[in-house]
Image (cartoon, rainbow, N blue to C red):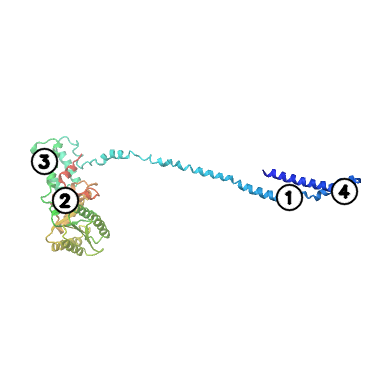
Amino acid sequence: MGFWDRFRKKNKEAEDIAENSKESAVEQAEEENGDSQPENEATSCEMPAPEAAEPKKTAEPEPVSMQEEAAEPESIAEPELAAEPEAAAEPEPIAEPAYVPEPKPVYAPEQASEAAPEVQKKKPGFFSKFFNNLFSTIDDDFYEELEEQLIIGDMGVYATEELLDNLRDDVALNKIHNPQDAKEFLIKDIKRIMAQPEGAYDFEETNSVVMLIGVNGVGKTTCIGKLASQYIARGKKVIMAGADTFRAAAMDQLKVWAERTGCFMVSGNEGADPGSVVFDAAKSAKARGADILLCDTAGRLHNKKNLMNELAKLDKILAGELGDYRRENIIVLDATTGQNALQQAKEFREVMHIDGIILTKLDGTAKGGIAVAITRELGVPVKYVGVGEGVNDLQRFDPDSFVESLFAE
């Protein structure tokens, strides 16, 4: 039953009560006044009406009905169904953007494989252009131009003169007229100059002390680390001596190589006497039964006599402590410095004996001819060449491959 139905019912009950009271009041009046006063009946009937206090009785249900009705709206909490919007969270499955990976070039590997051959493509040799149809016959102009190219290519004056003299003899003896045929004789003669002496790498198979020398920035410390890694990979027991105590970064760099290769290292404090480091390293090599002791030295300018004489001191210490070890002094030269590298080798050779050369940065702008010039003028063979930054990019020198690369097209 609704609110208004109950309200009407209660009002009707109140009206009935009022009417009953009204009738009882009329009957009373009739009994008291008799039939002679009919007109007053109406007045007496109308007056008691206010006494009925109809509003008082009807007022009673109002608070009850209002409270009851107020309670009902609470049940009208049906709007809680509005929580249904939570279902709006359904848009979460719109995580379809997960397909974003699709833009990734799945075909990139194929593209990389196609580009790979271009990366592996060999760089043309410095002298390749000269023999590419510049001359159709061999004459004086041919020899003059060839001489200029050899000197520009860092071959040096002595090596250039020897090569041209030998080429003229070969051309005349074999009656050659085609420059391409002359090129083959030139390549053969350069290979003769660069040929490795017998037993060039015997020191790697016996107890040896390998000392690397050279000016600043040519890569001595890096070469020490790479050689240590290669020797250890072959099963050799190697010790590294960090005798470059003038450059703090050199010791840190060598420590990184020692940790990476698992090689034992002897070093000193910054500014310590390099001779004391070499002495301790020699003692350690003997006590530990090392196969190879690799000594890193501080870079020094070839025109600083006092620093150059210090190398002679280190040489004497090693000779005294490890006299039964084979000695191998190797100078590290930057191939990009051209004829300056030749001058460095000459100055270092005045202080100590040089057994071999490491040419670094041959993968850069180096023309390569400097290797021929040094070998021809000093009679010192190139033992290793650096062609990259990887450990295995420090390689044994292969004369045939090297010369062929100078003329590669």
**Closer mark to the observer between disc 1 and disc 4:** 4
Q: In the rendered image, which residue does mark 1 sit on?
A: 59
Q: CA distance from mark 1 to mark 3?
A: 141 Å
* Amino acid on which the number 1 mark rests in the picture: Ala
Q: CA distance from mark 1 to mark 2?
A: 121 Å
Query: Looking at the image, is mark 1 or mark 2 earlier in the sequence?
Result: 1
Query: Looking at the image, is mark 1 or mark 4 earlier in the sequence?
Result: 4
Q: Residue at x 11, y 41 (%)?
A: 168
Q: CA distance from mark 3 to mark 2?
A: 30 Å
Q: Residue at x 73, y 50 (%)?
A: 59
* Amino acid on which the number 3 mark rests in the picture: Arg
Q: Secondary structure at mark 4?
A: helix
Q: Residue at x 79, y 46 (%)?
A: 20
Image spot of residue 153 (x, y percent): 19, 45
Q: In the rendered image, which residue does mark 4 sit on?
A: 31
Q: Which mark is residue 168?
A: 3
**Closer mark to the observer between disc 3 and disc 4:** 4
Q: Which mark is residue 383?
A: 2
Q: Which mark is residue 112?
A: none
Dot 3 and dot 4 residues touching (CB under 8 Å): no
Image spot of residue 23 (x, y percent): 82, 46
